[in-house]
Image (tube, rainbow, N blue to C red):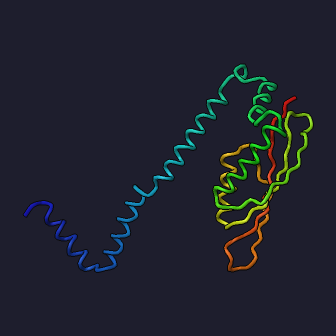
Amino acid sequence: MMAWQAPAAAGMRMARRAGWPAALGGGLFAFALAYGYFGNGGTREQIAQVTEQQRKLRELAARPASEMLPAREQLTRFYQRFPGGNVSQDVLPAVLLGLHQSAKKQGLSALRADYRDSAEADTPLRRVRVHIPVRGSYKAVRAWLNDVVATMPEVAIDGLEIRRAEIGVDEVEAQARFTVLLRAER
């Protein structure tokens, strides 16, 4: 008899005596090992991303103050991130068209768009409040708002009001309110 055969035979006798509870426990143990190794890939990716962000922030914090931009230059660059031009003739129609096209892409019918334009005190920005009523499924309304937030950084969602005619009906009427910040020409 080989050296490994005696312990293997003893292990088989113990497994037969333990019965199905031991088999179930062994199976659960194997599943836990496999899940621990293969199932946590997403968590490992998140940990790697956070670690990379921490490294970048440490590098930024370690920079000498002389490498940082002056406050006025930082503010100028911040304002340049917003779409600019003649707000009423160039920029605003493009933003409104983008909102309507995004709604249409999600299968919503945007009935109209009402807006109010006002200047932001002591800044080169204009604040435009936009109100758009739409009709469609709740899922489409959520997809539309997610698309707007992802693709239009100058647009912020101010509010959303949703009404359904009856409980069994899939179609909803939504009133979406947005704030759009645009850089006006001086």
Q: Foreground residue, 56 or 26?
A: 56
- Measuring from the top left, give residue 135's x and y in whole percent: 73, 65
- Measuring from the top left, give residue 116's x and y in whole percent: 88, 49
Q: Is residue 82 left or right of residue 115?
A: left
Quadrant housing the N terminus: bottom left
Residue at x 84% of width, y 40% of height: 88
Residue at x 85% of width, y 54% of height: 114
Q: Foreground residue, 125 or 101?
A: 101
Q: Quadrant of residue 182?
A: top right
Q: Is residue 113 left or right of residue 53?
A: right
Q: Quadrant of residue 145?
A: bottom right
In the picture as drawn, the residue positioned furthest to the top comes out as 66
Q: Foreground residue, 73 or 121?
A: 121
Residue at x 75% of width, y 73% of height: 164
* 141 up-or-down from 149: above or below: below
- Measuring from the top left, give residue 86's x and y in whole percent: 83, 34
* 115 up-or-down from 161: above or below: above
- Measuring from the top left, give residue 43's x and y in whole percent: 51, 52
Quadrant housing the C terminus: top right
Q: Foreground residue, 156 or 27?
A: 156
Q: How many marks?
A: 0
In the picture as drawn, the residue positioned furthest to the right comes out as 121
Q: Is residue 147 left or right of residue 77?
A: left
Q: Quadrant of residue 11?
A: bottom left
Q: Is residue 39 left or right of residue 19?
A: right
